[in-house]
Image (tube, coloured by chain):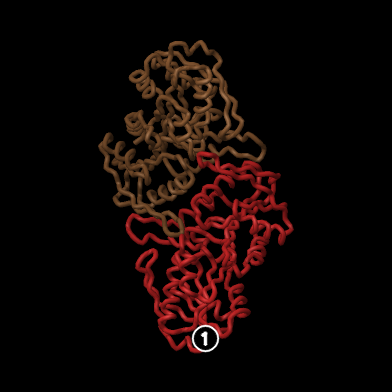
Chain colours: A brown, B red
Amino acid sequence: MAATVISYPGNERLARALADRLSLEVTLLETRHFPDDELYFRVEGDVKGKTVVVACTLDRPNEKIVGLQLLASLLRDLGAAKIMLVAPYLAYMRQDRAFHGGEGVSARYVARLLSAAFDGLATVDPHLHRIAALSDVYSIPTRLVHAAPAISDWIVRNVRSPLVIGPDGESAQWAEDIARRAACPAVVLEKERLGDRDVRVSLPNPDSLTGRTPVLVDDIISTARTMIAAIDHLRAMSAPTPICIGVHAIFAGDAYELLRTGGPARIVTCNTIEHETNGIDVRPQIRDTVAGLI
Amino acid sequence: MAATVISYPGNERLARALADRLSLEVTLLETRHFPDDELYFRVEGDVKGKTVVVACTLDRPNEKIVGLQLLASLLRDLGAAKIMLVAPYLAYMRQDRAFHGGEGVSARYVARLLSAAFDGLATVDPHLHRIAALSDVYSIPTRLVHAAPAISDWIVRNVRSPLVIGPDGESAQWAEDIARRAACPAVVLEKERLGDRDVRVSLPNPDSLTGRTPVLVDDIISTARTMIAAIDHLRAMSAPTPICIGVHAIFAGDAYELLRTGGPARIVTCNTIEHETNGIDVRPQIRDTVAGLI
């Protein structure tokens, strides 16, 4: 079936990378806000009978979610046969349980909205913790890209004698996978979260640091408080200056400045969310995964 | 059936007005943004088996639409029996046709989203032009509140010898209804829209102004360019300084400052969107309409 790629505003480089590697055309999308803030879309090409791949990473997700719902409706009206969402960062996955009475499971609600709008989803390392698999909440076919191989490659090429450090139990399996691929050891910090921006960590086995360059790895760098707490803890132990690696560079508010001030040797992220720290290219893997969806 | 009212953030006065007049409780809603901009909701009360009236006017609608979708899902999970949306201003109704190839009918798409989330909708004077009735696009029961009686009352109480002026053909029926109720004449300007912020108008029958105070009435004041063009046109004709009345006080960007600078005698709006120009209270009519929905 014929296929084409559309960039949701801000995702032009991702859309271009997908189109170039898959030998597809990019269909242009005219978008703007009306003065009253309502969104306007116009598809500048023929999508009738085609599979449309919509590129839109979902950091700062609220307006994007409603925009994607409107765009998907428009594409259906224009006769698109299938509409696939490529969202390298998938939002709302951390709200995966009602922690207190009266709370909801937003991960599930957003999954329902996107499943109603799209026929398939590809994403990179979604935050799967209490929800074990995307198929538990998404009713459409989903495909996962794993960033671990690209991160391991980067570590092998750039870090001498690394020790991969996962910041908390949620990252254990993931940090261990990266370390295994990079043929180096891994440890996991003990973490206590006291609030959105207040985190304490400690290294259970200080001897593991001997002769090693600490490489902190996390899936999402949002407030960066976990990374900063880990850097502070390592400094207090007189460990070598660590390298920080994140998959998803959210950097909420002043998080990036704060993390830089924290003094890591380097901050490196994957290009699932565009940011100046993007040093690890996962678009080839996304392209291969999307090729399997269309 | 037991019923309760919930205020979406920013709609506390509307929620309180509805609850007080209907002898209902307001169920508190804890809301915030996580640092990564995701929305958090927690319902601080028991909604199980109840009809829940959610008060949320829909100016600057994008985040609110996704927030309402999440909130409605949460209320369903908590066992709400019916969920009604009271949106005094209903967004996206002006995108009621595909004007050019590749465009969509966002009014229809938003209606589908809200119909999936809610069991009923009450609103005030939605912009019904090419869509004749809300039931053409909403699949849930809808109830309309008409602002014309309250506007006519205000005119009768505040303006000597008024001439109601509708700014364009879309407002003709509506301006004529207000004038008829106020027992005064009405005229409709001829309008040409050259862009989002560029509008030209002219009065077809200048004699109609003789001995009259011009009262410009429009359903939505967004950029205010239509009002300003009308004021300028009346000034060029040496007409008395007009009064401007709008139902929905959107006032996009610097529109309010610009309109004030345009020099009308007064600017008065209905309280469908909270604004310092709110001088016409339509909440009693909303309350009566909601009473018929629950």
Q: Nearer the viewer, residue B121 or A260?
A: A260
* Res A97 quadrant in image: top right
- The residue shown at (39%, 17%) is A181
**Image mark 1: chain:** B
- Give residue A121's position: percent from left, percent from top: 42, 36
Can residue B48 be seen here? The reply is no
Q: List x then y, in percent, for residue A127.
A: 49, 30
Please identify the residue farthest to the right as the structure is shown. Answer: B23
- Compared to residue A260, the image places residue B95 above or below, namely below
- Tell me the residue that label 1 is attached to: B212
Name the residue located 59 percent from the left edge and 67 percent from the top edge: B278
Question: What kind of residue is marked 1?
Answer: Arg
Which residue is painted at 47% across and 43% down in the image? Answer: A61
Q: Secondary structure at mark 1?
A: loop
Decide if residue A142 is in sight here: yes
Residue A268 in the image: above or below residue B239: above
- Crowd band around label 1 with a 10 angstrom C-alpha radius: few (<14), some (14–19), many (20+): some
| Residue B182 sits in quarter | bottom right
Q: Is residue B129 left or right of residue A79?
A: right
Residue nearest the observer in this picture, A92 or A24: A92
> Residue B225's x, y, as percent?
43, 69
Q: Nearer the viewer, residue B276 or A134?
A: B276
Q: How many marks?
A: 1
On screen, residue A173 above or below B137: above
Check the picture and name the quadrant holding the C terminus of chain B: bottom right
Does residue A55 appear left or right of residue A210 in this picture?
A: left
- Residue pictured at 41% horizontal, 16% vertical: A162
Percent coordinates x, y for residue A104 in the rendering: 60, 39
